[in-house]
Amino acid sequence: MSGSKGITLLIEGTVFDQWQSAEVSRDLKDFSGSFRFSFRDRYRSANALRYASRGAPYKLRPGLAVEIRINDKPVLKGWIDEASPDIGDREASMTISGRDKTGDLIDCAAMTDGPAEFKSVKLEEAARRIAAPYGLTIRSEIDTGEPFERYSLDLAETAFSAIEKGARSRHALILSDGVGGIVITRTGKTRAPADLRLPGNVTRASATFSHKNRHSETIVRGQGEKAGKKRGAASLDATAEPLAPEERAAGDGSATDRERKGTAATGRARDNEIKRHRPVVHLARSKADNVSAGDEADWRMRTARAESEEVTHTVKGFDVDGKLWQVNQVAAVSDAYLDIEREMLISKVAYREDDSGRITEISIISPEAFDKAPAGNRRRNKAGKKSAKGSGALDGTAEAL
C-alpha cells in the first residue's frame, strides 16, 4: 500500500507499517473493541523462503501489547489474542487479531479470593472493585441511582458479567473507551460528525430485520433482600411468660402474604410491535425489587428489539473535518432505499483500510434501544419524507472507493 496510512499499528511500542489490510471496530453489543491485521511476517519469511527480503526480525505471537491510532488519535490499547501464520508457493503471510484491554473482563473470573459480595455499594463502586485487578479505570457519566444493599458475585462468574448484571438492573450502558477504561453512561449523549444520506455520502447500505428473538412480553422475576421496608426490632420483656397454646391467636395468613410480596419481585415490559403471544421469562441475577426488575425487563425488551434490526451504511474515510465516526453517537439518517428518515443511534463502527482505500462501516439502530425514556415517535419516520426520484447516480457527493 503506497502513501501514508490512516491506521497506525504499534506492537510493543514498535510501529508495524507493512500490513496489507486492517480493520478496527467498536460495537455497543460486544463491549470490547477489536482489531485484525493481515500482512507479511518478515521474520518467518526470512527463515522459510530463500529470496525473502529481510526486515525487522520480530516474531509475532499472542500476548504482545498493541496500540492502534487512527489519524494519529489513540483508539485502542490491548493485546494480540491470536496469530495465524500461513505459507504457500512463494508467499507467506500473517494475520493477527485481538481486543482492547477490557477483553480480559469477558474471559476471566470476577473473583478467585476475597468477598463474595459487596454491601451498600453504588454501581460504579462495585464495577471499580471488580475491574481494579485488571488495571482498568471506571468513569460514570450518569447518576446510577440507589446503592445495592448486597451486590453478590457468583463463584464462576466472569468479571464482565458481574458488572453487566448491575448495569442492567440500573438501565445503564457500560462501554469500553478502548484505551483502558470503562464508561457507565446512557445512549446518544453526543452527535455524529455528519448526517448519513443515501443518495448522498453513503456509498453502500444493507439491512436485516428479524422477529426471531423478539417477544410480546418480557418478564423478569427476582427476589428482594427482605420484606417491605426496614422494620424496628421489638423490645424484649424479661418478665413475660410464654403463652399457652389455647391463648395464641390463630393467624389469618396475612403475614405470609406480606412476606411473599415483600421478597418476590416481578417486572414486565411489552413490545407492542409483536402482535402474537410470544412471552419470555428471565430470572434476575442480582437482588431485585419491583423497580429494578421492571428496569431489567424493559432493558431486555429494548436490546432484543435493537439486535433484531441491523442497518449498515458505508462511507468513505474515517472522519469528517477531523472528527471520527464513533459508537453511541446520534446521527440524522435519510435513506430512500431502506425507508429511514429519522434520528438513529450508531451502534458499531468498523474502520477498514487496504489497497482499495479507507472506509468506515457504520451500523445504526433505533435510538431508544438502550435508554428508558418512552419510545414515542423515535421509531417513526419524520412526516413529509421525500423519496429520491429518477434513476440518477446513487451518490452525488461521495468519491469512488
Image: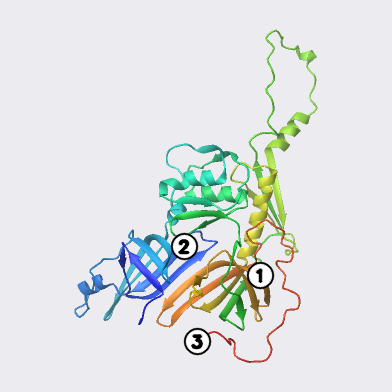
Q: CA distance from mark 1 to mark 3?
A: 27 Å
Question: Where 91 sits versus 220, above or below?
Answer: below
Quarter of image, res 4: bottom left
Q: Residue at x 74, y 59 (%)?
A: 277
Q: Position of residue 212 (x, y in %)?
A: 64, 65
> In the rendered structure, are the residues bearing label 2 and label 3 in contact, judged by CB atoms less than 8 Å apart?
no
Between marks 1 and 2, how big is the CA–CA gap?
24 Å
Amino acid bearing label 2: Gly
Q: Is residue 197 above or below residue 79?
A: below
Judging depth in this view, the residue of 322 and 279 nearest the camera is 322
User: Where does label 3 land, which residue?
Assistant: 400
Q: Is residue 88 above or below residue 236?
A: below
**Of marks 1 and 2, which one's residue comes earlier in the chain?**
2
Question: Could you classify mark 3 by the number of other residues whose Cα lies within 10 Å: few (under 14), some (14-19), or many (20 or more)?
Answer: few
Q: Residue furthest front?
A: 321
Q: Secondary structure at mark 2?
A: loop
Mark 1, residues whose alpha carbon is within 10 Å: few (<14), some, or many (≥20)? many
Question: Which residue matches tag 2?
Answer: 33
Question: Residue drawn 41% across and 69% down?
Answer: 72
Instruction: Tell me the element at label 1.
Output: strand
User: Within 10 angstroms of label 2, few (less than 14), some, or many (20 or more) residues?
Assistant: many
Residue 278 in view in this figure? yes
Please tell me whether mark 1 or mark 2 is closer to you in this view: 1
Type of amino acid at the residue the image marks with label 3: Ala
Which quadrant of the figure contains the N terminus?
bottom left
In the foreground, 259 or 367: 367
Going from N to C along the chain, the mark reached first, 1 or 3, is: 1
Instruction: Return the x and y of residue 347 as percentages of the image width and height.
Output: 57, 66
Residue 218 sits in quarter? bottom right
The residue where tag 1 is placed is 343
